[in-house]
Amino acid sequence: MNLNDIQNAWQEFSRATHISPIRDERHYTEMVRLADSLTEAIDSAKKHPLLDLFDLVSELIRSYDAEHYVVPDAPPREVLRFLMDQHG
């Protein structure tokens, strides 16, 4: 394992994707857009070259969500009522 090769590959990958822990809303929005694009590209394929990247981006988003957005516990009926109100 050559760390110089890894560093070079990481820098190139990072420039292309901006993959890193999400630290602000701007980066969060960028990662959500990337996840949406990956979802469209992967579609329903069980094996796709970008599936691991999608998993990584999704985990970064999940981690940011868990830290910044508290989801209160609510009975299913209340959740359904809320969603129906929000979506008419």
Image: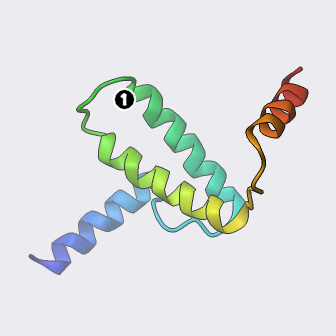
Q: The C terminus lies in which quarter of the figure?
A: top right
Q: Which residue is the extreme one toward the left?
A: 1
Identify which residue is drawn at 34% across, 67% down.
11
| Residue position marked by numbered label 1 in the rendering | 42
How many numbered badges does the structure rendering display? Answer: 1
Residue 50's place in the image compared with 83, above or below, is below
Q: Spot the residue most to the bottom.
A: 3
User: Residue 26: image x %, image y %?
Assistant: 69, 57
Q: Nearer the viewer, residue 21 or 7?
A: 21
In the displayed structure, does residue 77 sit left or right of residue 62?
right
Query: Which residue is more in the foreground, 19 or 69?
Result: 69
In the rendered image, which quarter is residue 70 located in? bottom right
Q: Secondary structure at mark 1?
A: helix
50 lies above or below 58: above
Residue 38 rendering spot, x and y as whole percentages: 44, 36
Residue type (three-letter) at the residue carrying disc 1: Ile
At a point 55% along the width and 63% down the height, the residue shown is 63
Look at the image and tell me in which quarter the N terminus lies. Answer: bottom left
